[in-house]
Amino acid sequence: MRYGIALFVIYLLILTSGMARGSTIEYEITEYDINVRVPETYDSFEIEASLQIENSMPDSEHTLEIMLCRNFRGAKATNLHIYDETSKPLDFSFEDDLVSISLSDASMGSSVVVLQYDLVKDEDFHDQFSPFAFEISDTLCHVNASITRTDNWYPKIAETMAKRLAPYQLVVDVPEKFEVMASGELIDVAAVGGQKVYTWRNYQGITDRSLYFFAQEQERIVREYDDDFRVIMYVPDGTIPTNMDYLADVIHTSFRFFEEMYGEAPWNEYKVMAFPYGYSGLFNSMNAPVTLFTSEITNNEIYFPIRSVIHEVSHTWWGNIVSSNPDENYWLYEGFGKFSEIIGIKPALGVDVESLSFFRLKLCTLPYIDYVPSILESQDSEDRVLVNVAAYYMGATYLRMLRFVIGDKNFYKGILEYVRQCRGMCISTDDFLTIMQKRCNKKYHGMLSDYIKNPGYARYEIDRLGTIYNGKHYLHNYEIINIGDKDIYTPYLVQSDMESYKEYLFLKKGEKFLVRVKSGFREPADHIVVDPEELFPVCGAGLKGPGAIVYENPSREVKVYNVAADAPFARAGIVDDMTLIKLNGEELAGNDLRTLNHMMLQPGGTELQLLVRAGDGEPHEVTVVY
Ligand SMILES: [Zn+2]
């Protein structure tokens, strides 16, 4: 055992020696040893966190400031005691999630500080995400780490929220009926007096962004593959064996595919646990809804729900191998996750729904195009719908456009380079941009950042310049004008009775492009269609969205969902799940998804009369003002 500890220490030294130390940071945690005990009373997690601390300016400061449970809505720390390595109590104050510790022997370069506390449910602060983040009961005990608010259930030095973790050991000590899935690699399981003690450490060479553990009464099942990969599954009673095979295979193939595209992961396993609150993508593991294990899986035409599993696997790279502060760069997690989910479907499932999926993303973005924040500022929106549209949909659409503009080969080389350079780091959007800009022609550099930093899509206008007759046929002259704040790169279709072709257009901000269309008819028509497949982040001038998505359900009712606040539908009193019956007197049922959502895109100033019904109530008319 001693030998094991010595090896662990050597390994920590190797791991930490390469870490950059900022000169302004006085204190740094260089090693975590965290013990969590779940008592059979299930009233608190009893935590002892031992921190190895380096003081890079030993004489300047005598107060160590540590954050504990900052911004964690749903749980709080109580009963805090702090000791040094000789178990001598240290003086401290604990206010507003900030622990200030007086270190009398501050001249020491390195020291150990031990915090003992109970993590309990915070009855005063609860929201819809609280049970997803934290729960303690006799059936489920967990702290999730897929959202930043939970990152601080263990101590962090003040102002280092977005930093990567130091190497760690995480011991989770639970009543013996539980299986535990936690951060990193399982090192040991020991039975001690009616409890089971699980010891986890970070995978070799790379630490996590945040720590998590989940304990449930489940069975641990391991699927091994010929290439030495294994999928470790924590499954509930009633799991269907073929579901397990399917899930393990999808995880295995998508993991290997992402390794090929994004770079190798330094381990050969992946963990998945059935979880009553749905999906979370963690470092080398995920939670997935219980129904994915216990009910027959029926995928829709774009392969939901199974594609969400592919998405979560990709978070091993997006947010973990390459990490960033999600309060500033949420799209680096979710835009990349959404993009990966789509490109992973074919290798993982053997079906090609890539274009259909990207088409859907654009279709589901246009309704919000006037209100969404920029991709970069997605996380700042108060409205969860807009956060998702900007970070996931627009982020993925942007990556697809970038891939198209610079070519597949160049794009994936750039992504590989991005992962290689940023592996194990906490980076920003500009780091990504710098690496990708190196892979493309200078004329696209501005465009690369404009689509991330400016809100909405690129905007164009098509002007008719007049028609001339050359003795044989008519020539209709049009101008495509870039009237927005982003350079446009898009295909456009020219179609008339005499010609039909598709071209690509690169149009800088403010520039115009002349298109001459031959026709046997004098009257102008819709001769030019920009982005005919509806895949690129462009849209026509002046178009406004309703701020909601409409679709026809299997009972042929047209329903509304994802209603954004302060947009035309919301202002007209339309809420999620209402039924739309008629638009300006015309029945809406029977229209496909595209038609329905295009009907709701209108020029600013337009008024639509909608006949709507809430639940089983009486239908009533509302006026939607764009
Ligand atoms: Zn995600």
Image: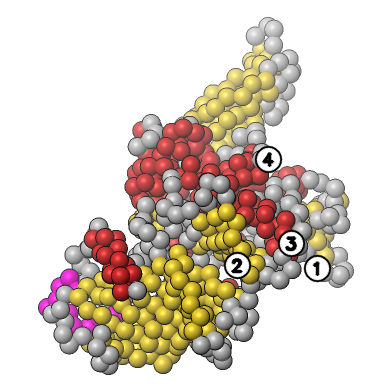
Which image quarter holds the C terminus? bottom right
Q: What stretch is highlighted in magenta?
A: 55-72
Classed neighbour count for the residue bearing mark 2: other residues with Cα under 10 Å, few (<14), some (14–19), many (≥20): some
Structural distance between the alpha carbons of marks 4 and 3: 24 Å
N-terminal of the two: label 1 or label 2? 2
Disc number lying in front (3 or 2): 2
Tell how many labels.
4
Circle 4 is placed at which residue position? 351
- Marks 3 & 1, CB-CB < 8 Å contact: no
Q: Where is residue 606 in the image (x, y as percent from the top left)?
A: 69, 51
Q: Position of residue 442 (x, y in %)?
A: 36, 33
**Residue 386 shown left or right of residue 34 in the figure:** right
Q: Kindly report the secondary structure that dominates the magenta region of the rendered protein.
A: loop
- Marks 4 & 3, CB-CB < 8 Å contact: no
Label 1 element class: loop
Structural distance between the alpha carbons of marks 4 and 2: 30 Å
N-terminal of the two: label 4 or label 2? 2
Q: What residue type is labelled 3?
A: Ile
Structural distance between the alpha carbons of marks 3 and 1: 38 Å
Circle 2 is placed at which residue position? 220
Q: What residue type is labelled 2?
A: Arg
Structural distance between the alpha carbons of marks 4 and 1: 38 Å
Q: Which amino acid does label 1 sit on?
A: Ala
